[in-house]
Image (spheres, rainbow, N blue to C red):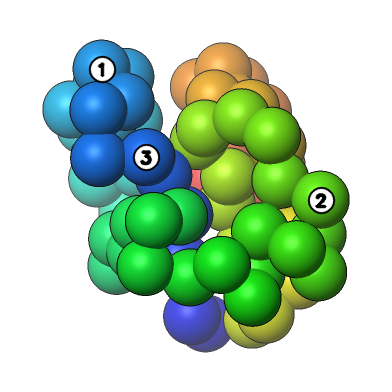
Amino acid sequence: MDVQLLVTQTDFCIPNLECELKNVGVNYHIDYVEMHPELVNEYNIKHSPNIFVDGKLVFRHQPTMHELQDFFGN
């Protein structure tokens, strides 16, 4: 499973989100919206963070721990 965090370079919630993803056992990589204007345009991204799983946008916000557990089945 490919989990991509598409975030702004100044998003202050990233450390918390990274901790929560690690707690549910999800490996991920970080990309920055500033470096991916094609994704910003394609998905009409206005906010950060955004989480893609296998190329599909699944969260347009910082999910709660419960949302992460429900989605990733942990």
For image coordinates 69% across by 34% down, the residue present is: 46
Depicted 3 relative to depicted 59: above or below: below
Depicted 46 relative to depicted 64: above or below: below
Q: Which residue is mark 2?
A: 44
Where residue 69 sits: x, y (%)? 58, 37
| Foreground disc of the pair 1, 2 | 2
Q: Nearer the viewer, residue 44 or 69?
A: 44
Amino acid identity at mark 1: Phe
Amino acid identity at mark 3: Thr
Q: Which residue is mark 1?
A: 12
Check disc 1: other Cα within 10 Å, few if <14, some if 14-19, many if 20+.
Answer: few
Check disc 2: other Cα within 10 Å, few if <14, some if 14-19, many if 20+.
Answer: few
N-terminal label among 3 and 2: 3
N-terminal label among 1 and 2: 1
Amino acid identity at mark 2: Asn
- How far is mark 3 from mark 2, CA to CA? 14 Å
Depicted 55 relative to depicted 26: above or below: below
How many numbered discs? Answer: 3
Q: Nearer the viewer, residue 33 or 28?
A: 33
| Foreground disc of the pair 3, 1 | 3
Decide if residue 53 is in sight here. Answer: no
Q: Nearer the viewer, residue 56 or 34?
A: 34
For image coordinates 71% across by 45% down, the residue present is: 45
Decide if residue 13 is in sight here. Answer: yes
